[in-house]
Image (cartoon, helix red, strand yellow):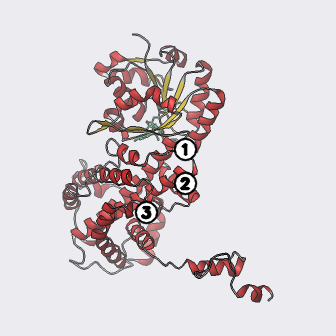
Amino acid sequence: MSAAEIGVIGLGTMGAMLALNIADNGFAVAVHNRTAARIPEFMEKAGDLARRITGHAELEDFVKGLASPRNIILMVPAGDAVDAQIEQLRPLLDVDDMVIDAGNANFHDSERRAKASEEAGVPFLGIGVSGGAEGARFGPSIMGGGTPEAWDRVAHILKAISAKYEGQPCATYMGTGGAGHFVKTVHNGIEYADMQLIAEAYGVMRDGMGMDAAACGAVFDRWNKGLLQSYLIEISGKVSAATDPETGNPMLDMILDRAGQKGTGRWTVIESQMLGAPVPVIEAAVVARNMSAQRDLRLAGAKAFGPTGGAMADGTLSLDDLEQALIAGKVLCYAQGFELLIKARAEYDWDLPMAEIAKVWREGCIIRSAMLNDMASALTDAPEQNLALAPYFADVLRKNVAGLRKVAVVAMGAGQPVPALAAALNYFDTLTSARTTANMLQAQRDYFGAHSFERTDKDGSHHGPWLDQHLQG
Ligand code: NDP
């Protein structure tokens, strides 16, 4: 077989699927894995596609099996494993050979690696890949970061293997350095929030309305035909309908309420705090996962206090209220995510293509949804505008915030936690407040720290009458 056009290191869940996808799109691909035994297993599973794949147990042979200049995708765990793999590879590579980190890197790491590569005069690309195993195999959404030249070199392959929305590839160059991984991080933060909002709606149906899993599933299926149409609503319908083969019970009822996470939601929140770009729905979702993990504490709390709210009376909430709540919550959570991207765009001097980001998320990725197409249109018209204020989405909010308010208030009255829905509502109420209570904060800050404040009636920086009095004792 002639030299491969691209290489993949790491034949785990994602790397194996990505390699098959590349081969399936007609490219010759070389693969390598730390644990060599995995390579023949992978080749066997590749079936017909194996004719375009060469497996190499030795890293040196893998490198030699690639056409120059080489392009090597790393699909290994983010962090130290990436650095270790790059360190092992570099001595074997020529100066124009390119490493492409396709894992879920922290964007600061990608910035550092891009800078080190630039100083060494070697190309580097950091790409965020979304869509899980199925996406990697049949078309993920790909967000690229690095020099435009690095992107252009492999764009034809990345576009070919990516998901397509009405024929348009969901693979886009986002900007220099860590831009691709930053956009992927925010994608994951939004994913946390979208999932949490759906989980809370499920909680209201299960605990407030007394619905069983199958009935919840039927509601998700129905919602998936309307404004909420999305992959996450679709799979929520599917998991709600599934039966546990061992017990015959609804599968959902047999799953422990302790959620895992790998950190990208937390990174989104950390970056939002650093940039002063509030993402309270995403924060609520991360906190909810953290609290879900504290099961022993929750069990102790439940034992100590018993039911903390009144029962949700029959008919207090309708499924239409709940659908409205999810629609409004979703718009507000995406508005926050895009605001964070707008802030990052200015802070890191990235030319983030706002509408293209919405477009690249329309297919292939976990948060794909019909609404993203409307978001792409809104961001095309006004890339720097908060989505909640874009005419189309302002209209959606006007029609649906009442449901969000009703669901949040009723659920909280019944002692049912709805942190993401409540955060969405509070965000909306703050966003639409011409006068907040921050004047009190400013007065307090000036009182104890002489931090000064602005006045409502004239320019400049001022102090209150209290300073002299209390500092003099
Ligand atoms: P897996 O755990 O399935 O596979 C990890 C792969 O990396 C294996 O091939 C493993 O080799 C290799 N590896 C682990 N440690 C090292 C190391 N120190 N040096 C060299 N190779 C190493 O992970 P995934 O495929 O799920 O994830 C890979 C990347 O993709 C991660 O960054 C992840 O966050 C990201 N990602 C994952 C998604 C998913 O849905 N799973 C979705 C999007 C991104 P070995 O066989 O020797 O253990």
State whether residue 113 is above or below residue 260. Answer: above
State whether label 2 is within 8 Å of ligand 1: no
State whether residue 56 is above or below residue 454. Answer: above
Q: Amino acid at mark 3?
A: Val
Pinpoint residue 304: horizontal percent, then vertical percent. Answer: 45, 76
Task: Return the disc, 2 or 3, that comes first in the chain's sequence.
Answer: 2
Q: CA distance from mark 2 to mark 1?
A: 10 Å
State whether residue 8 is above or below residue 459. Answer: above
Q: Amino acid at mark 2?
A: Glu
Q: Which residue is mark 3?
A: 281
Mark 2 near mark 1, Cβ–Cβ under 8 Å?
A: yes
Which residue is found at the position 53% from the left and 57% from the top? Answer: 272
State whether residue 448 is above or below residue 223. Answer: below
- On residue 107, which mark appears? 1
Front-most of residues 358 and 301 = 358
Pinpoint residue 355: horizontal percent, then vertical percent. Answer: 39, 48
Q: Mark 2 packing: few (<14 Cα in 10 Å), some, or many (20+)?
A: some
Q: Name which quarter of the figure residue 397 lies in.
A: bottom left
Front-most of residues 44 and 296 = 44
Which residue is found at the position 50% from the left and 44% from the top? Answer: 351
Front-most of residues 400 and 263 = 400
Q: Which residue is mark 2?
A: 271
Is the N terminus in the top left, top right, bottom left or bottom right quadrant? top left
Q: Name which quarter of the figure residue 240 lies in.
A: bottom left
Q: Name which quarter of the figure residue 115 lies in.
A: top right
Is the C terminus in the top left, top right, bottom left or bottom right quadrant? bottom right
Pinpoint residue 245: horizontal percent, then vertical percent. Answer: 23, 47
SS of the residue under disc 2: helix
Mark 2 near mark 3, Cβ–Cβ under 8 Å?
A: no
Pinpoint residue 255: horizontal percent, then vertical percent. Answer: 33, 55
